[in-house]
Amino acid sequence: MEQLILGVINKHVEEKKVIRSGQHGFTRGKSWLTNLIAFYDDMTSWVDEGRAADVLYLDFSKAFDTVSHNILISKLRKCELDEWTVSCVENWLNGRAQRVVISSTSLVGGL
């Protein structure tokens, strides 16, 4: 079921051009490596041209652990995704919680 919904969302995103071409994460055929290569190419070009280049690194590794389900569903609707798909995602997320086990100790947090 997840693969079916993912396919519908991916098709919609591609057809409606919801994601910019510079997006690398969660984009088919792109990854952290393609992002790093594009970044490196831009920075070396700027340095070669004598332009200033400042870099700010942000760690979003935990960003999706705390995303509000209501905000996510709202954004899916704003992207004009069909209501059937949005309802499927909403029903799938309803009542879900994240569980992490560290040294046999279970930590559960609702999202």
Image (spheres, helix red, strand yellow):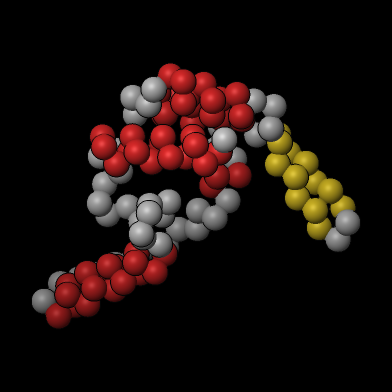
Q: Quadrant of residue 14?
A: top left
| Residue 29 visible in the displayed image | yes
Quick one: which residue is furthest to the right in this view?
104
Relative vertical location of residue 75 with respect to residue 103 in this rendering, above or below: above
Image coordinates of residue 67 in percent, x first then y, are 55, 37
Image coordinates of residue 101 in percent, x first then y, are 80, 53
Residue pictured at 52% horizontal, 21% vertical: 87
Which residue is rendered at x = 42% and y = 29% of the image? 76
Q: Residue drawn 40% across and 62% down?
A: 31
Tell which of 40 and 83 is nearer to you: 83
Total marks shown come to 0
Query: 16 or 70: nearer the eye?
Result: 16
**Residue 106 place in picture, x, y as percent:** 84, 48
Rendered-image quadrant of the N terminus: top right
Q: Residue at x 61, y 29 (%)?
A: 92
Q: Is residue 6 above or below residue 54?
A: above
Left or right of 13 in this view: 26: right
With respect to residue 33, does 61 lie above or below? Answer: above
Q: Residue furthest left?
A: 49
- The picture places residue 93, in percent across and down from the top left corner, at 61, 30
Tell me which corner region of the image, top left, top right, bottom left or bottom right, holds residue 80: top left
Examine the rendered structure and indicate whether residue 78 appears above or below residue 12: above
